[in-house]
């Protein structure tokens, strides 16, 4: 089958869209791994939110920008919505914070590592992403 033949068949277009969305979110792990991903999301999101608020209160020139970027990224990670995008933003913010601050770059590197892991692994089963884009089961009764 030619790759563009799927676009000519209207019935297959919805299947193509669902597969594309599922590939963006690599896994919706349940059980122990899902709990681990939930804890990673909660920790990373909470750190982003508190760091954004603290940075905005110090009066640093980029404090407001940090708040405007870190607060939504943290909230998205806590909810598990758009996890690859929020995790990538967490990586950028954490590495930028590690370069800008000379106090303790190790915590920022750790946050960047968690953000990268969440971007690559996905949000887990206890997330908004899993509810919106996860596998669905439809039972048809005869």
Image (cartoon, rainbow, N blue to C red):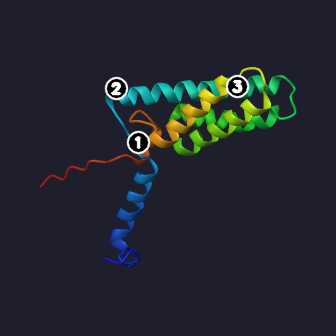
Residue 53 point in image, percent of width and height: 74, 25
Q: Secondary structure at mark 1?
A: helix
Outermost residue, top side? 103
Residues 31 and 139: in front is 31
Q: If you read the primary sequence from the N terminus, does the residue marked by circle 2 or circle 3 appear first?
A: 2
**Mark toward the viewer: 3 or 1:** 3
Q: If you read the primary sequence from the N terminus, does the residue marked by circle 1 or circle 2 appear first?
A: 2
| Residue at x 38% of width, y 64% of height | 16
Q: CA distance from mark 3 to mark 1?
A: 36 Å
- On the image, numbered disc 3 is attached to which residue? 105
| Residue at x 57% of width, y 28% of height | 44
**Mark toward the viewer: 1 or 2:** 2
**Tag of residue 4:** none
Quadrant including the N terminus? bottom left
Residue 127 point in image, percent of width and height: 45, 36
Q: How many marks?
A: 3
Left-right relation of 110 to 54: left
Left-right relation of 109 to 12: right
Residues 72 and 87: in front is 87
| Residue at x 63% of width, y 29% of height | 109
- On the image, numbered disc 2 is attached to which residue? 32
| Residue at x 84% of width, y 22% of height | 58
- On the image, numbered disc 1 is attached to which residue? 131
Mark 2 crowd level (few <14, some 14–19, many ≥20, 10 Å Cα) = few
């Amino acid at each position: 089958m030619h790759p563009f033949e799927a676009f000519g068949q209207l019935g297959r277009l919805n299947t193509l869209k669902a597969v594309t969305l599922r590939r963006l979110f690599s896994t919706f792990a349940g059980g122990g791994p899902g709990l681990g991903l939930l804890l990673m999301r909660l920790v990373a999101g909470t750190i982003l939110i508190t760091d954004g608020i603290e940075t905005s209160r110090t009066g640093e020139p980029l404090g407001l920008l940090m708040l405007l970027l870190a607060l939504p990224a943290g909230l998205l990670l806590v909810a598990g919505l758009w996890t690859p995008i929020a995790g990538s933003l967490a990586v950028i913010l954490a590495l930028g914070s590690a370069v800008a601050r000379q106090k303790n770059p190790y915590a920022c590197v750790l946050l960047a590592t968690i953000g990268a892991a969440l971007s690559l692994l996905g949000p887990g089963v206890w997330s908004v992403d899993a509810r919106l884009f996860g596998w669905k089961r439809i039972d048809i009764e005869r």
